[in-house]
Image (cartoon, grey):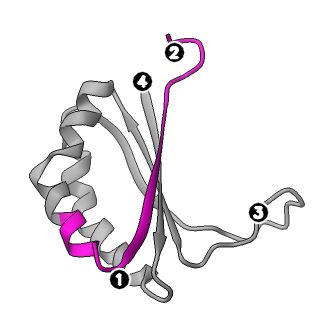
Amino acid sequence: MIYVIATLQLKPGVRERVLREVHAVSAEVRREDGCLEYTANIDVESGHPRQIALRPDVLTIVERWRDLGALAAHSSAPHMLAFRQRVAELVLSTSLQILAPADSAS
């Protein structure tokens, strides 16, 4: 199993626009072969003392994929290429953490 934490640093004030685009493509992503989870997340105040400061211009997408092959196919899927094009002017940067459970990583 592969986990992806995609962190999108957005231009100020555009988070709702980007969220609409993510929600529009999410159903198609979830139908991809090997997609186990694909959810958009925003920071929430928890009161936990170790929580980092809230980031109003960050969107975090949490993904789970069957394997690296499914993730690679997702990365080049036509709907994802179109999505990236639609939000390009709204996103300042994107970082990916690609993870595997420690007991299965080689």
Q: For the residue labelled by badge 3, is the local secondary structure a helix, a strand or a loop?
A: loop
Which badge, 4 or 2, comes first in the chain's sequence?
Answer: 4
Q: Give the CA distance from mark 3 to mark 1.
A: 24 Å
**Residue farthest front in this picture:** 92
- Specify the amino acid type for callout 2: Ala
Q: SS class of the residue under badge 4? A: loop
Q: Are the residues flagged by discs 1 and 2 in contact, CB closer than 8 Å?
A: no
- Quadrant that contains the N terminus: top left
Q: Which of labels 4 and 2 is toward the front?
A: 2
Residue on which the image places disc 3: 52
> Where in the figure is residue 75, as x and y percent of width and height?
23, 44
Residue identifier under label 4: 1
Answer with mark 2 or mark 3, whichever residue precedes in sequence.
Answer: 3
Q: Which residue is drawn at the image coordinates 31% and 67% (left, top)?
A: 23
- Residue 93: where, in percent of width, then height? 43, 65
The amino acid marked with disc number 1 is Arg
For mark 2, what is the residue? Answer: 105
Mark 2 Cα within 10 Å, few/some/many (few <14, many 20+)?
few
* Mark 2 to mark 3 CA distance (whole Å): 28 Å
Amino acid at circle 3: Ile
Which quadrant of the figure has residue 66?
A: top left
Residue visible at 35% across and 83% down in the picture: 17
Q: Quadrant of residue 84?
A: bottom left
Single out the mark in the foreground, 4 or 3.
Answer: 3
Marks 4 and 1: in contact by CB < 8 Å?
no
